[in-house]
Image (spheres, helix red, strand yellow):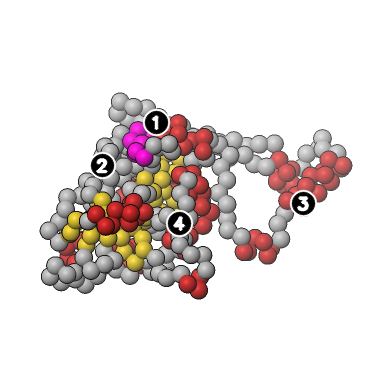
Amino acid sequence: MAAEAKLVCSCGGDSAAGFSFRRSLSPLLASSRVFFPNVTSDQRRRQLTALAVVKRSPKRIKYSAPRFTKEDGLTYVAVDPSGSDLWKLDPVIDLLKQGAVGVIPTDTVYALACDLRSHSAVERLRRLKKIEASKPLSILCRSFHDIDTYTTGFPRGNNQGLTDIFRAVKQCLPGPYTFILTASKALPRQCTRYGTTASKYVSRKNVGVRIPDDTVCQAILEKMDAPLIATSVKSMRESEWILDPVVIADVYGPEGLDFIVDAGIRVADPSTVVDMTGSSALILRQGKGPKQPWMVSDDEDSGVKRKELTLNFV
């Protein structure tokens, strides 16, 4: 016996799309709570036996990470970029908190995102985009409070004579910048799980942090209890961004993507990536964010470093 609920929402503007959810109640669970006069005792016994077989031990439940399961296909939610219909995002928030992996807009390009507290979601995100464990990920933050929590913060000054880096950075965020900082112990290990696997020799790793200046993205972050792990949405065969949500659905839907938030087609202009872990604010990738006077440009010797660090940043 199955119970099914479906919700369809049309979008305003020139485009129309909807989202749907279906929940199926397991026949075994349903029959364990409802009396069916036509069910024989043998059938009932087999059902109860099946329930006993699939039941997991308390120890396994306690120590295993929850896995996100979604019976329906890709969930597609179209919203107005202005934020006039942000109520449509509520189902997306529920999915993220359950451990889903989906695509959301930012102020630059679209991003694959998931809850940083869900180990299984982070691993699924890596598999979806085929990101090696040796590659870093970035986090989308709600505010500077998140940055202070999951990193050791911005440096006090640089070798250019700037003593108040934080005040300078505040002029850039929210905005199209990714700042690479040293990760704190509060950041889950799977978010920076690259390099040697021997914990005895693992030093504290770096992470890219962003506060996007996008109404839809900010609304999603505000409804979450923690930042989102994010990586740019690129073609699986070519090193270029996918800017159309419909194309993203075609490419990543069959790979197991859970949802897409469509806020219009973006422009191929990623964030400017600035490494703040050294003696100066070093630009590793010049993107949408303009170069600030206190930033220095990358040189030829750091070309390999740039490729490793910025490959997956939004």
Residue 62, how many percent across, how many down? 63, 64
Q: Secondary structure at mark 4?
A: loop
* Front label number (1 vs 4): 4
Which residue position is annotated with label 3? Answer: 53
Q: Earlier in the sequence, mark 2 or mark 1?
A: 1
How far is disc 4 from disc 2 in space, using C-alphas? 25 Å
Which residue position is annotated with label 4? Answer: 134
Q: Earlier in the sequence, mark 2 or mark 3?
A: 3
Residue type beneath disc 2: Asp
Which residue position is annotated with label 1? Answer: 246
Q: Secondary structure at mark 1?
A: helix
* Front label number (1 vs 3): 1
Residue 143, how many percent across, how many down? 29, 59
Are there few (<14), some (14-19), or many (20+) residues within 10 Å of tag 2? some
Q: Residue at x 42, y 55 (%)?
A: 135
How far is disc 1 from disc 4 in space, using C-alphas? 30 Å
Are there few (<14), some (14-19), or many (20+) residues within 10 Å of tag 4? few
Q: Earlier in the sequence, mark 4 or mark 3?
A: 3
Labels 4 & 2 near each other (Cβ < 8 A): no
Is 124 left, or right, of 29 in this rendering? left
